[in-house]
Amino acid sequence: MEDCIFCKIISGEIPSYTIYEDDDTLAFLDINPNNRGHTLVIPKKHGEKITDLDDNDVAAVFRTVKKVVNGLQAVIGPEGFNLVINHGEVAGQVIHHFHCHIVPRNTGDGIEYKYDGTTPSQEEFQELAGEVAKHIV
Ligand code: AMP
Ligand code: ZN
């Protein structure tokens, strides 16, 4: 897609530190890594949200995520990873081409992703689960 930085990386117009590539996906180092080895995995076909992607591309992205996690584990050996997808501007998506962040994590690395818990009632849980379940196709 015109004016999309990640499409330009796919076409080679903008350089990247590529880790892995196949017919459907590309994995490359994030230019401003949160931690050493911070990698992005993208589908080659432009789509902003997961709902814009073919099912095949959704699956392909996560197959590549698994390969990259194995590669990073072998080279960097972190204690864990955050696999993060900022989905929509309100959720922090800056680049409007779907991507999964893979961030190696170690105890005391100082990175903080905060998920503050709330405490809905049983009724709220039940009603919501039921409503959403009806809309799963
Ligand atoms: P997000 O906030 O989820 O949209 O994250 C976009 C990510 O893309 C950020 O972590 C940026 O550092 C990264 N990024 C932006 N431009 C480039 C680039 N040319 N090469 C690699 N990573 C990039
Ligand atoms: Zn794009």
Image: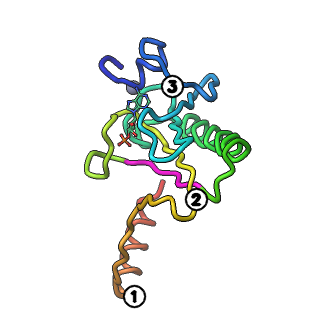
Which secondary structure class fits the magenta region best?
strand
User: Dividing the image into four equal quarters, which quarter contains ligand 1?
Assistant: top left
Which label sits on residue 106?
Answer: 2
Q: Is residue 109 left or right of residue 80?
A: left
Which residue is depicted at the point 54% across and 25% down?
17
Q: Which portion, as a residue range, is magenta?
A: 81-86
Q: Which residue is mark 3?
A: 44
Q: Secondary structure at mark 2?
A: loop
Q: CA distance from mark 1 to mark 2?
A: 36 Å
Residue 108 appears at what percent x and percent y? 52, 64
Say which label, 1 or 2, has the lower sequence index: 2
Residue 75 appears at what percent x and percent y? 70, 41
Which label sits on residue 37?
Answer: none
Tally of numbered discs:
3
Q: Note whether 120 is above or below 64 in the view shown.
A: below
Residue 126 appears at what percent x and percent y? 41, 81
Say which label, 3 or 2, has the lower sequence index: 3
Which label sits on residue 122?
Answer: 1
Front disc: 3 or 1: 3
**The disc labelled 1 sits on which kind of residue?**
Gln
Residue nearest the observer in this picture, 54 or 60: 60
**The disc labelled 2 sits on which kind of residue?**
Asn
Q: Secondary structure at mark 3?
A: loop
Front disc: 3 or 2: 2
Residue nearest the observer in this picture, 136 or 82: 82
Query: Mark 3 packing: few (<14 Cα in 10 Å), some, or many (20+)?
Result: many
- Pick the quarter of the image with the N terminus: top left
